[in-house]
Every structure is written in C-alpha cells, then in structure tokens.
Image (cartoon, grey):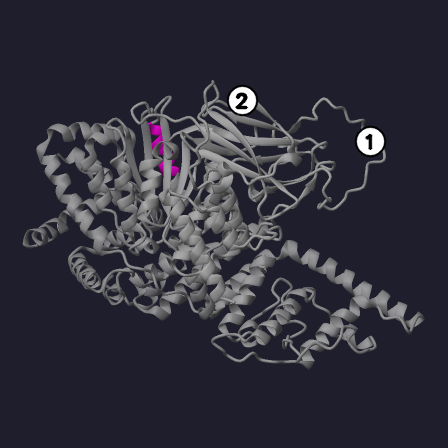
C-alpha cells in the first residue's frame, strides 16, 4: 500500500506523470482499499478547496508603489537616458539657434522655444481647480478637454529654466484661452522625462469624470507609463476602471477607395459573433454600446442566412447578390455570402475536447462561473458517447481537474464540473500549456481536437506578457489542436484580447451573455462551433473599373489584409465551421456618379492602358482561398459577378436582413458614411422579419432608438 | 530593448502578485504593516535582479524571496508564530449571497481550526497549495523541500484531516 501512497497524492493533485498515472489507475481498478483511501482524501481535498481560498483584497499603499516604480525606472533607464540626452541636446541647440535667430531678426519669433515657453507661462499663470462635481457641466467638459489636450501636448523633454530667461517673453502667440485653464507643473528636476504627471494628477483633475476622461485620453494616446501611475495612485479611478474595465480596440473605419488607385480589396473572413452579443448586453441594460465595440461584420454574421449549400468538392459555396443602397442614393450594395458544408451530428467525427476554464476569484458572480457550468453541461448533452472531454482550470496554479473522459461517463464529467469553485488569481499561460498538452495527449486523427477557453477576460498570464501569450497560442495552433474562446460575464472583459487569441488559435470567439446564446452555440450550432471545415479563408475582390468607380468594405476593419497576403499561405486568416455562413458587404459607387474618394495623382511612368470590352459585362471577380483543416497549402476558387451595376434599382429582398443589420451597426458607430440612415430606416427594412432572433433584433433597434431620444 | 521589457515586466508582476504576496507574507509575520515592508522589499529586489534569469519563473522567485525575507524578519524579532489567526479576519470570496457567505465564512473558520492541529510544515504547505494555489514544483522551489517531500507532507496533512472532515460530512 505504501508504494502507492506517493502516487495517490500526486494523482489527487494532478501532479502525476502519465506513466505513473497508468500504473496507479491500473492498481486502482482492483484495489478496493486504495479506492477508499482515494475517495476519502478527495473529500478532504474538496473541502479544503472550497473553504480555504479567500479573495486577496489588501494591496500595497501608494508610497510603496511609487518607491518600487522609482527603483524600477532607475534600474532600467540606461538606454532611455541616451535618447533623453540627445533629445535634450537637440532642444537646447534648437533654442540656441532660435535665440541667435531672434537677435538678427528681432521682429520674428522662433516658434519652437516660444511655444514651450508659452505653455510654461500658461501653466504658472493659470491654475484653475475643477471642483468636485458628480456630473461635469458642458463647459467644464470643454475646459477639461482643453486641459487634457494641453497636458498631452506638453513636451516631455524638460527645459532648463535658465535657458528660458534669456529669451524675450512676448505675449503667447495663440489667442487667449477661455477662462484660463492650466496646471501647476513643477518644472525642472521633479519632472521625470517619462511621466508628465509626477503626482500632479490628483491635485489638478479632481472630479471623478475628469479623471476618467484623462484616463481615457491617456489610453488613447498610449501613454502607458502615466496610465499605470494614474491607476495605481488613485483609488477612485481604480475602482471606476475596475467597474468598467472593458477594453475595446480602436480602429478606423474603412473609407472609399477608387478602383483606379487600387482595384484589389483583400480581407480575412470572420465568423465571430461576439460584437452582436455585446451590443445586446448593453442595450438590454439600458445603455448605448461603446462605439469601439461595434464590429459590423460580427453583427451581420450573427444571423442565419439562407444561402445555397455547397454542391461540389469545395467545403463551402459562395453566393453573390446586388441591391440598391438604402442610406446612400448614389451607391449600390453587393453582398458576398459563404456557406459552409453541413454535417449531421451522427456523421461528425469524434471529438477530443479540453475545457480550459477560468476559475479565478473574479469568476465568482452569478453570471459567470455558475452560468459557465450550466453552459458546459448543455454542451455535454449534445456530444456523442465516444466524444472525450477533459477539464483544465487555471487559477493560481493550473490543474487538470478531469482527465480526458469519454462522454459515456457523463456522470463523472458532470460531477467534476459541479465541484469547480472560484478563487485566487489567474495564471492563464500555464493553463493554456496544460490544456494543449492534454489535448495533444488524446489527439484523434481526423477528429475534432479543440481547446475551449472560457473566461471573463481577466486574463492575468503569470510569467508571460500578452504578446507572449499570443505567441504561445500561435505555436500551439500548429499542433492541429484548435482553440475557441468564449467570454462570460461583464466587467473585466477584455474583448480585443480574446478575439486575437481565438484568431491565432484558429477558432471562434463568442460571447455568451445569456442562456439562449449558450444554447445557440452549443446546441443549434454545435457543429459549427466544434468542427472547422476550412481554415485561413481569405477573400480578394477585383473590381472592374469600367463599372465600379469606388468601393467601401463595410466592417472587417481589423481583418484587412495586404493584397500580397492573399497568395501567402503563411498568413493567418479566419476559419469556417460546419454550417456557418459568412457575409461581407461592399458599398459601391458606379462609374458615372461623382467620385467620392480622394483622388490620387495619375502615374507618370505607368500611364493607364487601353480599356478593352472583354469584361464589360462583369462587375467584379471574387476570389477565395482556403485550406482544408489538416493541410497547409491553400486552394483557390473564383466567382465572377456578371451584371450591370448601374441598373440595380431596388433594395433586394434577400439582402434585407444583412442590410438592416449593417445600417444599425453604422448608426451605432456613428459612421461618417451613414448617409441618411436612421433607426426608422432600419425598422422599415426589418418589417416582416419572422424568425425569433430577427424579432429580437427589432426589439434591440427600438431600444436603441428610445435611448438615443432620451439622451438628446 | 531589454530595459523596456524589464520595466514592463516589473509593472505587470506588481499588478499580478502584489495581493497574493501580501496575503502570503501575512501568514508568517502576522502584521499588515510588516507584511507590506516584506513585499515592498521583494519587489525592490526584483528591480535589482538579473531580468533575463528571473523572468521565466517570476512567481516562484517572488514567493521565495518574500518568504525568505519574512522568515528573516521573524528570526530577528523572535516572533515565531503559529501560522494562523491572521487569515481568519479576512472575508471569504465576494459575490456570494449573504447566506452562502455566512456558510463560507463558517467553513473557512472551521478549516482554519482543523489546520491548526497540523504541524508547522504541514500548515505551511496546505496554505501554499490551497490558498496560493501553487503547484508542487513551485512549492518545492519556494520552501526548499524536494517535490517528493512536498507530496509526502501534503499526504500526511490530508490524512490527519481526514477524520475531522469526514465526521463533518456525516453530521451534515
């Protein structure tokens, strides 16, 4: 019995090697005493796991943070200070030139040094403290904007005060600012070159909304040092941020492009739907969703479209359709739709799934871990007997809670799920490794091998930085095990991060905000969620300049590819799951209407060649590249679209769903191309929608409409 | 740029490990004040360390340094404590309903009482395993015990607790 004691504890805690595990499990089959002992210790382990973990609430006082950061900076500033000295030297010499210049031309002001001086003047002259107000008044906001802009625009290089006094001090060149705004800065030694703020933030920006605004501005400008300092030193903003710690990527909307400048438009497909769930979450809570969270392609792709199913060898079919553009009289819309092959549940290959679950303390609220457990059980009920499931958790250390178990033992899996409880901080990096190892260890040839990561996004990753994590996933993706990411709960929800991870992991990214969504992903669309039928799917469209003057891709901003990436199999792109549909819309300006895109000069050395009539009947050529899931070489499909763009006169019936969703998205994003779009237009397009999810969409539009009226 | 990596790495480490380390330090030194000093010292040491060597095992490194410093202070102040009561004062995990919270608090208290009956080594390892959620390897690095030793100690700890906890089950 003693020989197995050591193995037993290792087995219990998931610290056992595979070889030993086999030995132990074999003995366990026949040795009832061992079974009893294991069970007893499992009880103890469960009890301790349940009752001992506490939330780590205490943190270091601000002085400690400051001292640590100061030391860190000192120890890491060697390479910085070289630049610092160079730039300082540059400024000083520029100032000297300016001085010299001003001697010779006394009337002319050298703007460089004087601008800085002017700013310094502003700082010392004006010092207005914004009063603590629960809601910033409009004027206050305006003043605040300026203050923030000023602060950001201040040069980071410190100017020696002595140099200053040698310059004459003319009045500030800019017009006098309204009600003087400024900040008392301490010029000179106190100002660290890397941080503008050096503790002045708290004094200068007093009111909470003021601080949050500053925080957002810093974030936008990527002043990470200052951000960190601000966050750490201010409890108030810390809690505010924690309460709304949702990070969305900023991206610039696609503009119109002239076909004569660039006839090729290339992008990666995307079946993620998280943005729609997110929008729904906000609207159901009575809030407008943040503009940065709107990814129109994800909203459009949320819905089911009745595209033709593939008939030939290719795993998907491409459908093209044309329509008038409801929000822009001069434009037309073209819709590209891909439909993935359907696979019967019985025909679905065997699955080897590893649930990688975040059970950190932050997952404790009702809409997170308990909800996750419910959703997982839903998935379990839709797996086949031979499918295998393993559960890996990450919180602090990571652990294999359930080794890969066939679904014929549904009870064991369910109870393992039930036993999960939240506590501790997270270490996602180690968890991912363990999950992949487990998946690889149980790899099924020609089967579905997937890690399903479920988290609220509070993804502290232990030793690696975020980019390290992305690298890790990229590496692991090559093993043939795919990664899907599912978001739960709100707050602490790092949307953009999670999407990137799913992208690199060749899997989908979904956000589960309610039970119906869980049902959708795990029951109705389970095949799509689990079974990738084509990976790295890219689309390249060539527009015919004889018909199309300019084009604009609606959405897919962070999916765009360079045109040379289309044929480059090493470039990663999106995946299609079984039964999935993918939709992309282009807004097209036909030849003959006024050109909307900025004009690029004609080439001098490569003048435009003669146009032939060979392709006059074609509007565009759609090319699709894809790889079979286990192959590395891509295949090419081509679909020319014949027709007369100018003759398209109606809003196409079959495109009404996609069009209405796109319009809604553009209004929510406050797109500069939304033209005459308004909520009523969306509602009109949506008249007659009969499916449940489409009716839900109409409800959301109405909510948004009401909110926008209330917020005026 | 190594230096930038280091600075970023230190900031991230601070963000990640500050709170667990504080709880960890309090296990040994009892007082919040002293625990803060210990943790601050640990991070300062991190700033001074060779980043390339440390970055791949930040967590065990930080915990080891922290533990060593805490023990050093205890030796100096001759305040050898039974590693206990401090944690009783903190509330269990948030987001639980009031009833569940009471129940959770009760089981926390209960667990802590049970653990007091173990010897120092066993108590320390139980806390490291279940509160800090460290792996055997990490525990071994931090405490200096061999991995095998860690397993043996945890096993004996669990065995000792077996009867108490199983009695609990029966009376439910």
The mark found on residue B85 in the picture is: none
Q: Left of A251 or right of it: where is A347?
A: left
Disc 2 on helix, strand or loop? loop
Q: Is residue A392 visible?
A: yes
On the same chain, marks 1 and 2? The answer is yes
Q: Residue at image x 23%, y 51%?
A: A49
> Residue tagged by mark 2?
A633
Query: Is A162 a magenta residue?
Result: no
Q: Residue furthest left?
A: B171
In the rendered picture of this protein, how many numbered marks are placed on residues? 2
Does the magenta-highlighted stretch encompass residue A439? yes
Range of residues picked out in magenta: A433-442
Pick the front one: A118 or A587: A587
Q: Locate the N terminus of chain A by quadrant.
A: top left
The label shown at residue A606 is: 1
- Residue A480 showing in the rendered view: no
Residue B104, compared with residue A311, is above or below; it is: below
């Amino acid at each position: 019995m003693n020989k197995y004691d050591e193995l037993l504890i290792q087995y219990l805690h998931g610290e056992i090697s595979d070889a030993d595990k086999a030995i132990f499990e074999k003995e366990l089959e026949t040795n009832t005493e061992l079974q009893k002992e294991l069970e007893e210790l499992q009880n103890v382990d469960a009890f301790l796991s349940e009752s001992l973990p506490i939330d780590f609430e205490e943190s270091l006082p601000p002085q400690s943070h400051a001292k640590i950061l100061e030391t860190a900076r000192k120890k890491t500033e060697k390479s910085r200070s070289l630049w610092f000295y160079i730039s300082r030297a540059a400024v000083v010499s520029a100032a000297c030139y300016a001085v010299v210049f001003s001697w010779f031309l006394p009337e002319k002001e050298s703007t460089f040094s004087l601008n800085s001086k002017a700013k310094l003047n502003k700082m010392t002259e004006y010092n207005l403290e914004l009063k603590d107000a629960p809601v910033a008044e409009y004027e206050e906001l305006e003043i605040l904007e300026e203050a923030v802009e000023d602060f950001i625009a201040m040069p980071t290089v410190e100017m020696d005060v002595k140099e200053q006094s040698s310059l004459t001090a003319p009045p500030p060149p800019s017009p006098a600012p309204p009600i003087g705004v400024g900040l008392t800065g301490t010029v000179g030694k106190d100002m660290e070159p890397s941080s503008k703020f050096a503790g002045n933030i708290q004094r200068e920006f007093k009111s909470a909304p003021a601080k949050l605004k500053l925080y957002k501005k810093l974030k936008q400008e990527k002043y990470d040092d200052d951000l960190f300092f601000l966050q750490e030193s201010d409890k108030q903003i810390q809690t505010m941020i924690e309460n709304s710690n949702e990070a969305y990527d900023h991206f610039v909307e696609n503009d119109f492009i002239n076909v004569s400048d660039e006839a090729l438009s290339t992008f990666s497909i995307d079946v993620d739907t998280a943005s729609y769930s997110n929008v729904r979450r906000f609207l159901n809570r009575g809030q407008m969703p943040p503009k940065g969270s709107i990814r129109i392609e994800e909203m459009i792709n949320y819905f089911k479209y009745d595209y033709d199913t593939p008939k030939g060898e290719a795993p998907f079919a491409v459908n093209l359709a044309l329509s008038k553009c409801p929000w822009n009289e001069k434009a037309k819309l073209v819709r590209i739709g891909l439909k993935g092959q359907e696979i019967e549940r019985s025909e679905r290959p065997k699955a080897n799934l590893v649930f990688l679950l975040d059970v950190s303390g932050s997952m404790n609220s009702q809409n997170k871990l308990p909800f996750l457990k419910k959703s997982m059980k839903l998935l379990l009920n839709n797996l086949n007997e031979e499918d295998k499931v393993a559960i890996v958790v990450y919180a602090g250390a990571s652990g294999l809670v359930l080794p890969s178990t066939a679904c014929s033992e549904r009870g064991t899996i369910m109870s393992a799920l039930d036993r999960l409880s939240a506590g501790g901080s997270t270490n996602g990096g180690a968890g991912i490794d363990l999950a992949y190892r487990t998946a690889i260890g149980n790899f099924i040839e020609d089967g579905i091998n997937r890690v399903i990561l479920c988290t609220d996004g509070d993804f502290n990753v232990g030793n690696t930085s975020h980019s390290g994590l992305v690298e890790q996933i990229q590496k692991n993706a090559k093993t043939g095990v795919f990664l899907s990411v599912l978001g739960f709960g709100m707050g602490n929800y790092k949307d953009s991060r999670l999407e990137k991870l799913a992208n690199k992991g060749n899997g989908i990214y979904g956000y589960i905000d309610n039970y119906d969504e869980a049902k959708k992903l795990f029951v109705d669309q389970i095949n799509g969620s689990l079974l990738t039928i084509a990976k790295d799917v890219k689309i390249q469209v060539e527009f015919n300049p004889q018909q199309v003057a300019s084009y604009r891709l609606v959405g897919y901003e962070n999916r765009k590819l360079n045109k040379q990436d289309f044929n480059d199999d090493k470039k990663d792109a999106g995946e299609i799951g079984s039964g999935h549909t993918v939709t992309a819309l282009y807004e097209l300006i036909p030849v003959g209407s006024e050109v909307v895109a900025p004009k690029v000069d004609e080439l001098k050395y490569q003048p435009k060649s003669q146009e032939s009539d060979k392709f006059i009947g074609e509007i565009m050529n759609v090319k699709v590249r894809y790889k079979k899931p286990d192959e590395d070489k891509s295949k090419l499909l081509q679909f020319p679209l014949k027709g007369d763009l100018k003759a398209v006169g109606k809003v196409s019936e079959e495109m009404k769903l996609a069009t209405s969703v796109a319009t809604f998205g553009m209004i929510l994003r406050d797109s500069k191309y939304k033209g005459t779009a308004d909520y009523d237009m969306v509602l009109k397009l949506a008249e007659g929608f009969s499916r449940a999810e489409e009716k839900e969409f109409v409800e959301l539009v109405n909510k948004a409409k009401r909110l926008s009226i209330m917020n005026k | 740029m190594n230096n930038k990596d280091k600075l970023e790495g230190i900031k991230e480490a601070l963000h990640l490990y500050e709170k667990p380390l504080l709880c960890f330090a309090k296990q040994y030194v009892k007082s919040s004040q002293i625990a803060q000093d210990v943790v601050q010292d640990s991070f300062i040491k991190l700033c001074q360390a060779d980043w390339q060597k440390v970055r791949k095992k930040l967590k065990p490194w930080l915990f080891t340094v922290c533990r060593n410093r805490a023990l050093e202070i205890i030796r100096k102040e001759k305040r050898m404590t039974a590693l206990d009561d401090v944690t009783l004062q903190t509330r269990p995990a948030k987001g639980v309903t009031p009833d569940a919270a009471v129940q959770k608090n009760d089981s926390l208290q209960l667990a802590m009482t049970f653990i007091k009956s173990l010897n120092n080594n066993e108590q320390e390892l139980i806390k490291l395993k279940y509160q800090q959620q460290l792996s055997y390897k990490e525990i071994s690095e931090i405490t200096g015990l061999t991995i095998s030793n860690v397993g043996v100690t945890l096993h004996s700890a669990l065995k000792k607790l077996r009867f108490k906890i199983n009695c609990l089950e029966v009376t439910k």
